[in-house]
Amino acid sequence: MTAIKKLRADDATLRSARMLIGGNWVESASGEVLEVEDPAHRRSVAEVPRGHSEDVARAVKAAADAFPAWSRTIPRERGRLLARIADALEGRVEELARMIALETGNALRTQARCRRIKNLRDRWRLVTARDQIVE
């Protein structure tokens, strides 16, 4: 299951996102959500979980539980896994750019697509290359 699901069928889709904790997409422990508003049109475009300290504690515990296995993974394999994330980001550049532009009110051609998505993808590639060199 993905982190985001459509709540409406039209193009002005209200999306509902969840948090990734321990490899699972989950709601906040409280069940509370925050509305994400398109500032250009003053309309709701998404709902996201409103995380609290209990959610942070769940995420920190899940990360701590996962760390021993991750730290035993050889650098080359970690690099391959991170490269898969970079590939997935690259394959969704348009979708991610549209989401960023919608929630920030920025023009799609100027802000979102060019800088933010490319920078995020490039950071994953840099970490991937570094992990493969370390080995």
Image: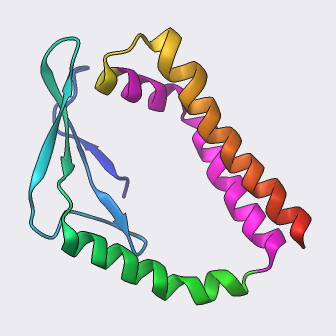
Looking at the picture, tell me which residue is in the foreground, 127 or 15: 127
**Residue displayed at 68% across by 59% down:** 82
Tell me if I can see residue 64 in this picture.
yes
Q: Is residue 12 left or right of residue 109?
A: left
Q: Position of residue 96 (x, y in %)?
A: 46, 32
Chief secondary structure of the magenta span? helix
**Residue displayed at 73% across by 81% down:** 73
Q: Is residue 121 above or below residue 61?
A: above
* Quadrant housing residue 108: top left
76 in the magenta segment? yes
* Quadrant housing residue 103: top left
Q: Is residue 82 left or right of residue 62?
A: right
What range of the chain is rendered magenta? 74-101
Quadrant location of the C terminus? bottom right
Q: Is residue 28 above or below residue 6?
A: below
Q: Position of residue 75 (x, y in %)?
A: 80, 73
Quadrant location of the N terminus? bottom left
Q: Position of residue 123 (x, y in %)?
A: 67, 45
**Residue displayed at 21% across by 60% down:** 51
Q: Is residue 119 left or right of residue 7?
A: right
32 in the magenta segment? no
Tell me if I can see residue 9 in this picture.
no
